[in-house]
Structures are given as C-alpha cells and as structure tokens.
Amino acid sequence: MYVIPKPFKEERGQGFFVFDSSVKISAELPIISSMLNAFCKADVPKGDKTVEFVRGETEHDYELAVTEKSVTATAATDEGLFHAAVTLIQLIICADGADARIPVCKISDKPRFAYRGLMIDVCRHFFGVETVKKMIDVMSVFKFNYLHMHLSDDQGFRLQIDAMPKLHGHASKRAQTCGDRKPHGGYYTKAQIAELVKYAAERFVRIIPEIDLPGHTRAIVSAYPELSCSGKQTDVATWFGIHSKVLCVGKDTTYDALEKIIGETADMFPCAYFHLGGDEVPKLEWEKCPDCGKVMEENGLDDYEKLQGYFTNRVIKMLSERGKTPILWNEALFSDMLDKNAVVQYWEGGKATAARVAQSVRDENRKVVVSCVRPYYLDYPYGFSSLKSAYMFEPCLESFGEQGAKGVLGVECPIWTEHVATEEKLFTQVFPRAIAVAESGWSQGKKDYADFEDRLLKVVKLLRSAGISYKPVGKCNPNPITGAMQMIAFGIKAASKLDRDSARSARSAQQHKKKK
Ligand code: ACM
Ligand code: ZN
C-alpha cells in the first residue's frame, strides 16, 4: 500500500472503499475532520458509508480497518488517531481514478523510535511563521513528532526576550550577508511563538527551542558585549563559519543573563526538551580571560573542555529547575562530565567523536539522537547525500552494540541555511530526503529502496497538491560524476562565504579530538 512511513503491519483485502459524497466522517478532533474534508471533498455527507475515529485500547499506536462500507480508526490516544488520519489521507491521495478508491485493508501501526525530528536553522536565513507552518504540515503527514528550531547563532538571534530587548532589537539583524550589502533580519514575537507552538501541537509536533551555547553566540555578545571575555563591541556576523566571539563562562553576568534567556524561552515552549547547542566552541578567548581562568582554578578544571562542561552543567541546572531535559550536540561529551540525563545529538563524522558517542551509549546509558552529517544534513547537495543513502542509513549504529536499541532515542535531519535563502530552496533541499528519514524513524524491518521509491512517487502528490516544492525523485540519486560536480560547486561556494576568523576558530574548536 502507498503509505510512508511503511506501517508496522498491513494486510490487503478484496475490494475498495470509495470516498464519495455519501461518506460521513465522525472525528472528535477538529484537525482530523478538517484535514479529511479537505482531501475527500465530502462537504455534504449523506451518511451511507462511515469513517470513524474512535478511542479504544490497542497495543499499537493505531489500527485502521477499511471495508467496502466503513473505515474505522482505533487508537488509545488522540495522537494515534491523528496518525491513523494521515495514513488514510495518503491512501486517498494515492488512489487511482476520479473517485478516491482506497483498498480494503487492515493496518496496525506503531513507531520504531520515540523521537522523529527535523531541525530548521532560522538564524543564517530567517523564515517566517507561514513557512514554518508549511514545514509542520508536511512533517505531521509523515509522522515526525519534533521540530527543532535553531534560534540563536552568530548571524542572528530570533526570539523576543523582554528582559534583554537588545536580543530581538539588535541581535536579530545583520548588516549584510557575505558582502551582498543587503540587511537581513527577523525574529519571532512571543505571540508568534505561541501561534506556532499551538499549530504544531494540534498536529502532534512538539517544538524544541535551541539556544546554542556557549559558542555560536556572536549575535548575543554583539547586543551585550559584557557577556564576552574581552567586553569589546562586535557586530552580528555577516559571514559564515566558526566565530571566536563566544560567551565568557567565568563571569556571573553571563549566568544571570542566561537565567533570563532560558527562563523566557522555556516559558514560550512547553516541550519537555530544550536544546543547548554546545557545538564548535573555540576556546581562544577563554585562554586569555582572567575570569575564565579563575573559574578553572576554583573548580579544579584542568582543560578547556572541562570548562565547557562546567558551564554546560550549570546551564543544565537552570533547565532541570524548569522540568526540562537538555539536548546537546556531541561536542558536549568531551568534557567527560556531561550531566547523565542530557541527550546527545550525534552529528559529526570524525573517528574520535564516533568512538566517544558509542562509548557513551554503551557504558553511560546515554540517550542519543542520530543526525550524522552524512546522510542526514539536508543542506548538502543530493550528490553528497542522495535520497537512497538517506533512506538506507541505519541509525542504530553497529558501534553502539546491544545498548543501541535502548540508547537511540531517534533520528533527526537538520537543514542549515547558510546557502538556503528562499522557501523554494529550503523545501527542495528538505523534500523528499526528510521523508526517507521519517521512514527510518518510524518503520522497522528490512529496508527496500525500490519499494520506498515506488511509494514515494505516489505520495509526493501530497506535496504537489499543497504547493510545497521538492526535488523531483528522478534527480535525487545523481550519478557519481554529477554528484562530484555538485560537491565541488558546493565546496567552492561554502569556502567563499567563510569569515576570516573561521579557520583559526575551527582549529581551536576541534582540540577535543586531539585530546582523545
Ligand atoms: C553543527 O552542525 N555544528 C551541529
Ligand atoms: Zn571569560
């Protein structure tokens, strides 16, 4: 059957259920009736045939029973009923002929992983509420349940923070992007965040905010230079790469400011998870800073990774007091003192990181979200990560051993936006690769790319009918020569957009790999 992600169990029967105007839809959840009505065009139901969504016990997330006369969805939760509805919508949209004829069938479905995420970077290029809502729409149809929003980086801070108004007033704008001489900016007001959180929740998507700390903070220290080691004025970054202007982790003023930022952000996002970043932190300023030096001495910290660990655990405490579970990029592990409840997001491909993450899963009961650059970073060309490679990738890595089954919380595909300035580019980078990741997050059993592509060719009609751009499936697996050319073009473009400071900062940020 044409459903993505592939259901846990499906049985095809004889005959069809025809969605015509004699169908009566009964669903208590308004989102289900409105979505189904939009797809079935059964505005004036006569009630001859029924489509019912009922709450009831089941060992699965949902069950869907289709006969010639009725469709019955059963689930113990509203979320399960919503999942049944999006499965049904896919069956309808993939039906052949003028009438929506869906096969008589029985589906029993449940997810492989609890966490199925997609990350959007709204700092390098800002995307407004309407674009984020479209992303949520598509995510929800493929049973993603977490939208991770990367809200603070060197090139912009994207949230209204009342106690520190220069964050949205000043840090949300940059003078230009890589020499284009055009100012770029934007931030979400509290009302807009409330609107997005509600919109996502109605579709059973939770929004995880990320305030990336203590690196990637040039926008923050541009608004409040007293939060840096030197206290010197700087600008919101106008070039990409890794920047040396990070938070001072030795001054109390930094922690006072973070109480405010974390406090207001946590209040805006009810999600149980809160992402604290922690990636790519150059230690160049800390090495010269008496305040950072003093904290190291007072706390017996003998290297800068430990100093980052001290900082991270102090901020984690602010989250714990607010009932939140932290998520951090994998660099946070290298202090060897990361709070045991922190979830690690595994992204970076090097050997030292792979070994450290695997060790944490095996020996420290660490929960991990798998986001390996290759093939899950959707900003890279299809020649680097083809649709097939994204689909075939197995997130429970062999190196995790038996613990992997317990340690892997789920999967997430990030879209970084240094080279993504328009909605069309955003969606063609993300789709359909994210749909392959959705299947890895939800479905179990042996992978069959040909079968996936067959289903996808039908299911992409959903994107087309919603006016969402996507890369045509035929172009998603370029041959090696085309792929190499795409990579060369991408590499040249990326290199031409790096800040002058970036190479030195990157070397400093990668010291942890040498330590191991
Ligand atoms: C990252 O890609 N810097 C997490
Ligand atoms: Zn300092």
Image (cartoon, rainbow, N blue to C red):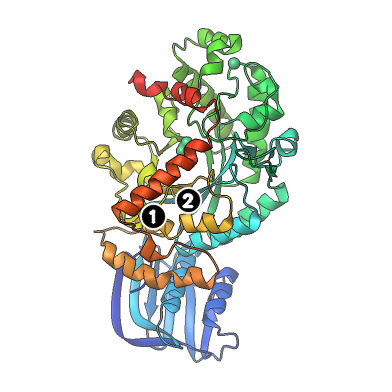
Q: Secondary structure under badge 2?
A: strand
Q: CA distance from mark 2 to mark 1?
A: 9 Å
Looking at the rendered structure, the kind of residue marked 1 is: Val
Residue 6 location in percent, x, y? 34, 65
Which residue is found at the position 50% from the left and 89% from the top? 20
Residue 168 location in percent, x, y? 72, 39
Q: Are marks 2 and 1 in contact (CB under 8 Å)?
A: yes
Residue 437 location in percent, x, y? 39, 55
Q: Secondary structure under badge 1?
A: helix
The circle drawn on residue 115 is: none
Packing grade of label 1 (10 A; few <14, some 14-19, many >=20) is many
Query: In the displayed structure, does residue 481 sit left or right of residue 155?
Result: left
Seen from the viewer's position, the closer of residues 421 and 213 is: 421
Looking at the rendered structure, the kind of residue marked 2 is: Leu
Which residue is found at the position 48% from the left and 71% from the top? 462
Packing grade of label 2 (10 A; few <14, some 14-19, many >=20) is many
The residue beneath circle 2 is 118
The residue beneath circle 1 is 437
Q: Is residue 261 visible?
A: yes
Residue 359 location in percent, x, y? 30, 30
Which residue is found at the position 51% from the left and 28% from the top? 502
Q: Earlier in the sequence, mark 2 or mark 1?
A: 2
Q: Quick check: 174 above or below 515?
A: below
Seen from the viewer's position, the closer of residues 428 and 362 is: 428
Which residue is found at the position 29% from the left and 82% from the top? 13
Q: Quick check: 300 above or below 466?
A: above
